[in-house]
Image (cartoon, helix red, strand yellow):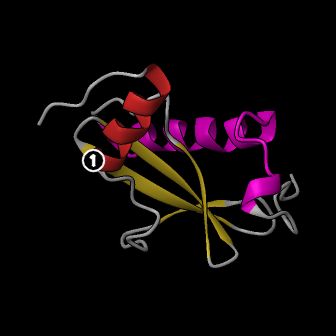
Amino acid sequence: MTNPMKGQKAQDRNLNDPEEQEYVRRSIVDWFKCGGREIPSNSSSVQEYKDRYYVELHNVDGTLAVYRIHKNGILKALKRWPSEVECTLDAMYKVAAKAKKLRVVH
């Protein structure tokens, strides 16, 4: 599988692209094969940072795992990842509130 995101900027990519969904699906499969017990959210997604692509698996408790997508399409689970890739709970709630027009109460 070739990297479908090679040469594309973040604003040019379609986040519902079937190939990106395939990377997320493969990451979730690996997460459970390696002993992950928590269920990743459906909003886990592909992120771009410094011309590299990552799959970030998260749930309501925060980031569960991050996988790097290599140019040849291979996924590599990372022990440490850039903090910019990590989805923060406040950011998730703000995005959800805007999308659903809900009020966020802390």
Give the residue at x 68% y 36%: 21
Q: Is residue 15 left or right of residue 37?
A: right
Q: Is residue 20 above or below residue 25?
A: below
Residue 17 counted in the magenta span: yes
Say how many tags the image has.
Answer: 1
**Could you say where residue 90 lies in the image, as x and y percent from the top left?**
27, 47
Instruction: Provide the major secondary structure of the magenta segment.
Output: helix
Q: Which residues are magenta?
A: 10-36
- Quarter where residue 47 is shown: bottom right
Q: Quadrant of the C terminus?
A: top left
Q: Is residue 35 left or right of residue 1?
A: left
Q: Is residue 88 left or right of residue 15?
A: left
Name the foreground residue: 23 vs 7.
7
- Label 1: element kind: helix
**Could you say where residue 92 lies in the image, as x and y percent from the top left?**
37, 41
- Name the amino acid type tagged 1: Asp
Residue 49 counted in the magenta span: no
Name the foreground residue: 19 vs 9.
9
- Quarter where residue 23 is shown: top right
Q: Is residue 66 above or below residue 34?
A: below
Q: Residue furthest left?
A: 106
**Could you say where residue 11 lies in the image, as x and y percent from the top left?**
75, 56
**Could you say where residue 104 lies in the image, as x and y percent from the top left?**
23, 31
Give the residue at x 88% y 57%: 2
Residue at mark 1:
90
Give the residue at x 28% y 33%: 38
Label 1 crowd (10 A; few <14 / some 14-19 / many >=20)? few
Give the residue at x 44% y 45%: 57
- Quarter where residue 37 is shown: top left
